[in-house]
Image: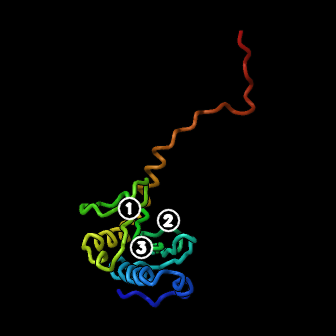
């Protein structure tokens, strides 16, 4: 699927980027649309990075993939990247949930492993989101049972 035209809110932010990074961001966006086939994209400016989220809706939890333009490179990131299989070992990050691949040249986008990751991340987003919630719920400590607030305390003999 070819990428749709650049959204107006993205066009307004592009001039502040380095020309090389700008070209990489546009190419990375086209890459995600070609291999991921997301339903929506959401542009947001985080001051230190210009990001675009791709997925089912504009909510970050519904994204499978995002692109983020920094001063010297672009990241293609995966919201639930910790759950993705990465046999080529190209994912970076050590958090509980997110991972990314750093793109410094156009040639970095030609990696077949990156194409597979984008396809898998968009397709597996719902399953990954459910699994991540279940993992969090299982790792939370269970609350101690409390006495009812109106219960009378007995004096010790």
- Give left or right: position of 149 versus 24: right
Give the residue pinned by disc 1.
81
* Residue 112 screen position, x and y as percent: 24, 73
Label disc, if present, on residue 30 of the rendered structure? none
Q: Which of marks 3 and 1 is in front?
A: 3
- The x and y percentages for residue 28 are 38, 79
Decide which of tag 1 and tag 2 comes sooner along the chain: 2
Picture quadrant of residue 22 = bottom left
Do tag 2 and tag 3 residues touch (Cβ < 8 Å)? no
x then y, percent, for residue 18: 47, 81
Marks 3 and 1, how far apart in space?
A: 19 Å
* Precedes in sequence: disc 2 or disc 3: 2
Q: Name the residue under label 3.
A: 73
10 Å crowding of disc 2: few (<14), some (14-19), many (20+): some
Q: Earlier in the sequence, mark 3 or mark 1?
A: 3
* Residue behind mark 2: 61
């Amino acid at each position: 699927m070819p990428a749709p035209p650049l959204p107006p809110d993205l066009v307004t932010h592009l001039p502040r980027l380095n020309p090389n990074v700008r070209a990489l961001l546009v190419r990375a966006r086209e890459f995600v649309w070609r291999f991921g086939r997301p339903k929506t994209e959401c542009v947001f400016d985080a001051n230190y990075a210009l990001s675009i989220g791709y997925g089912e809706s504009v909510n970050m939890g519904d994204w499978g993939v995002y692109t983020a333009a920094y001063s010297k490179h672009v990241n293609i990131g995966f919201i639930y990247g910790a759950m993705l299989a990465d046999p080529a070992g190209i994912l970076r990050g050590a958090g509980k949930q997110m991972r990314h691949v750093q793109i410094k040249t156009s040639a970095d986008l030609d990696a077949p492993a990156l194409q597979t990751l984008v396809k898998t991340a968009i397709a597996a987003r719902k399953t990954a989101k459910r699994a991540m919630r279940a993992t969090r719920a299982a790792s939370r400590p269970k609350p101690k049972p409390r006495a009812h607030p109106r219960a009378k305390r007995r004096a010790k003999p």
